[in-house]
Amino acid sequence: MARGVNVLLKPIIEVYPVVPAKSEEERAALRPIGRNVERYQDALMGACEIVKHADEIGFWGAAAIEHHFHSEGYEAAPVPGILNAYWAALTKRLHLGQLGYVLGTHNPIRVAEETAMLSHLTQGRSFVGLARGYQSRWTGILGQHYGSRPTKSPDADFNQAAQAAGFTQTAIAQKDYDDDAINRALFEEHVDVMLKAWTQPSFHHKGRNWQVPFPFEAGIADWPLAKAGVTQKFGAQGEVDETGVIRAVSVAPAPYQKPHPPVFVSGSGTPATIEYTARMGFHPVYFCNIETSERLAKIYLTTSRQSGFDVRYGEKQAMVRWIYIGRTDDEARRLAEEYDAEIWKNFYGAMGRRAAVANPMQSAFSTGLICAGSVETVRKELVRQFMLVPAEHLVFVTHYAMTPMDFVQENMSLFIEKVKPAIDEVLHKHHKKVPLAI
């Protein structure tokens, strides 16, 4: 974020592809709707139109997501990198990335290669999003060879609604803490490998899950190009020892961006995740209400400064919001419920910490996670939130194709034209001031 006073919000459109049904009865009749080719094709191509619209009207970025096995049709998007590459050909200005790769289920070298390629395809307008993985149906299956385990972050700051429902940290079994520790250690090792692959001409690594080269102690003695002296002549320094054995590898290409694309890390209230993100100089993404976001933003600032980073309060940070703008408050709320009540009931309402809330959509309205109303109401609420946390990014979530295209695109345009300027003014005023002492 610039040190001058001309600071502008960088909004990111995040498309959660939802295979549409007119009702829960139709969704049941078409089960498994997630495998319905015609409807999925419509949702996918429509998502591309939304991304093109974002590029045209001035969004900073667009993000894809990673979820697997979503036969129910909610958030059905398994391969964010492929979508990002396709979107690169459709856009001219947008920064493209993911929120994000569940890194513990992936080979980190393959992720490093894939995102470096995206960095080149976009000539630098890309970012990388990472997550630790909480969905039990697929995190363990896809990450089984790495020992990946899903986690719901038992050390998180629970929101008021969850506490009122009786969910407290003391009620969580020790197994959850153990799984969380395993998940976190795997995630951090994979990040370490990925960063080495991006930034080092050649690297070696020996950790709990990875040896590079393999086997690490013996090295690789039968690489033909080393036997012929080719790698020693043309390869990276340090790849081959004096006996012709591979002792390191060089991941090519290096990213177009130096030292690598910006890294975003998704979180829903876990201080340990935010502290790690700050120590690494990454961008935290807050999938939580403004009160929790404010606490985490202060943790991020303190830890960043302790780690030697010169950041302002709110810098590098992103808040996630669902935004519905209507002609009146009542219309906006009615349309939000008409289009998206089903996914809040059947997906968010059954998933993670929101399962503690009797009516998750009502809770999201009341906590400001959903901003629904007239232009004036949405603008006033987001200005209030950004005065508390002057975040660099706002992630604007949309559930296309459950939410119709015309509504999605009109909401995006109204946000850019009528709401964003007021947030820009908040950021402008904030960054004229001396950074807050936290």
Image (cartoon, rainbow, N blue to C red):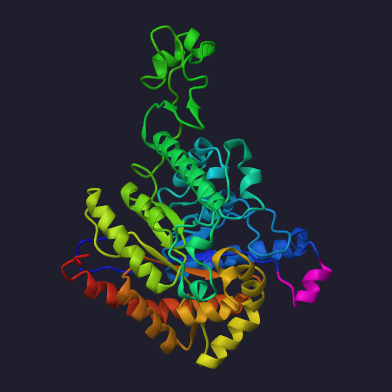
* Residue 20 in which image quadrant: bottom right
* Left or right side of 308 for 272: right
Residue 132 is situated, as x and y percent measured from the top left of the image, at: 51, 50
- How many tags in the picture? 0
The correct choice, above or below, for 343 with respect to 64 in the image is below
Q: Image point 63% across, 46% down: which residue?
A: 140
Nearer-the-camera pick, 75 or 302: 302
Residue 14 is situated, as x and y percent measured from the top left of the image, at: 52, 64
Which quarter shows the N terminus? bottom left
Q: Residue furthest right?
A: 29
Q: Residue furthest left?
A: 434
Q: Image point 52% across, 21% down: which residue?
A: 214
Nearer-the-camera pick, 419 or 32: 32
* Left or right side of 275 for 184: right
* Left or right side of 374 for 427: left
The region drawn magenta spans: 20-30
Q: Determine if the magenta segment contains residue 428.
A: no
The correct choice, above or below, for 352 with respect to 78 in the image is below
Nearer-the-camera pick, 56 or 1: 1
The answer to whether residue 315 of the structure is visible from this angle is: no
Nearer-the-camera pick, 438 or 57: 438
The answer to whether residue 265 of the structure is visible from this angle is: yes
Residue 189 is situated, as x and y percent measured from the top left of the image, at: 45, 38
Q: Determine if the magenta segment contains residue 28.
A: yes
Which quarter shows the C terminus? bottom left
Q: Residue furthest front?
A: 170
Residue 51 is situated, as x and y percent measured from the top left of the image, at: 53, 64
Q: Image point 61% across, 49% down: which residue?
A: 139
